[in-house]
Amino acid sequence: MLGKEDCRDRRVIPRTKRHLVSDRNNNPQVESRVLIKDCVPISEYKSWSIVGGKL
């Protein structure tokens, strides 16, 4: 389950976040799960880089 169930109305609240990540090789596909780490800012919005591939 990728979310937490709300105690009042039993909805599932998603636990995912979106980040702008630098990827020089352009390996991951859209909506693939990867590991990221904080790094030196690469551009105005990108301060993350990809560490690992699919989980």
Image: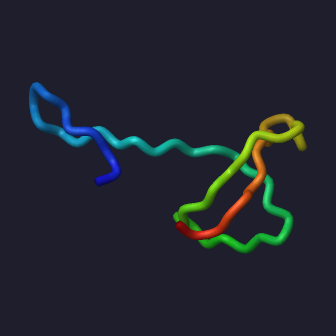
Give the mark count.
Answer: 0
Query: Residue at the top extreme?
Result: 8
Q: Quadrant of residue 4?
A: top left
Residue 15 in picture, x, y percent from top left: 40, 41
Residue sitting at 89 percent across and 43 percent down?
Answer: 42
Q: Quadrant of residue 41?
A: top right
In the picture, measured across the screen, residue 13 lies left or right of residue 52, that is left
- Image quarter of the N terminus: bottom left
Residue 52 in picture, x, y percent from top left: 68, 63
Residue 19 in picture, x, y percent from top left: 64, 44
Instruction: Give the colouring mode of the picture.
Output: rainbow
Q: Foreground residue, 48 or 30?
A: 48
Residue sitting at 77 percent across and 70 percent down?
Answer: 26
In the picture, measured across the screen, residue 9 lies left or right of residue 2, that is left
Q: Foreground residue, 51 or 42?
A: 51
Residue sitting at 79 percent across and 42 percent down?
Answer: 46
Q: Quadrant of residue 51?
A: bottom right
Seen in the picture, residue 34 relative to 36 is either above or below; the reply is: below
Query: Residue at the left extreme?
Result: 9
Residue sitting at 20 percent across and 38 percent down?
Answer: 5
